[in-house]
Image (cartoon, helix red, strand yellow):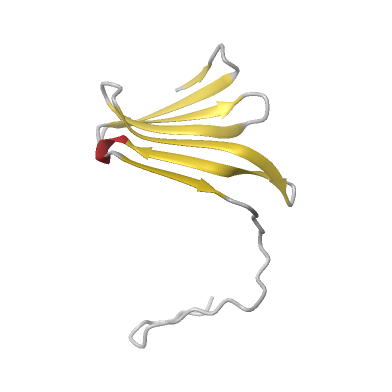
Amino acid sequence: VANQKDDGTYELIYPDSTNNTVSTIIIDASNLRIIRCLISDMRGKVSYQADYDGFRKVDDVYLPFNISINDKANDQKLRVEYRSIELNKLTEKLKLDIPDDAKVTDL
């Protein structure tokens, strides 16, 4: 379900009958940035909320530099504030430690 709200946002609602939850994504209609994600039960009680703000342009992509997560079900909060973000700029070749018993398939 998609709704346009009076506050200038779009609300995308995804019911999940398997987990008995509803995921709601709030998008700023003026720039199409995701500004909030909610997970609630079927009655509307929110158990998880993530808010995104402080958007800045990085390599032609707007990214949130501030993320607030509220795990209401477990009474836990986390706020992440990025000072800088670099996209796709590996300074050295990516090295993965592959376990000896892993099967490697070259594509």
Residue 54 showing in the rendered view: yes
Percent across and percent down for residue 67 are 51, 42
Percent across and percent down for residue 98 are 42, 82
Q: Does residue 97 lie above or below 14 as drawn?
A: below
Judged left or right of residue 58, residue 45 is: left
Judged left or right of residue 13, residue 92 is: right
Residue in view at x 64 percent, y 55 percent = 85
Residue 16 showing in the rendered view: no
The residue lying toward the viewer, choosing from 91 and 10, is 91
Q: Which of the 4 image quarters holds residue 18?
A: top left
The residue lying toward the viewer, choosing from 82 and 94, is 82
**How many numbered marks appear?**
0
Q: Does residue 89 lie above or below 72 as drawn?
A: below
Judged left or right of residue 94, residue 50 is: left
Q: Residue furthest right?
A: 60
Percent across and percent down for residue 4 are 55, 17
Q: Residue furthest bottom?
A: 100
Q: Does residue 4 lie above or below 84 as drawn?
A: above
The quarter of the picture where the N terminus appears is top left
Residue in view at x 65 percent, y 54 percent = 84
The residue lying toward the viewer, choosing from 103 and 34, is 34
The quarter of the picture where the C terminus appears is bottom right
Percent across and percent down for residue 99 are 37, 83
Residue in view at x 60 percent, y 42 percent = 64
Q: Which of the 4 image quarters holds residue 17?
A: top left
Residue in view at x 66 percent, y 58 percent = 87
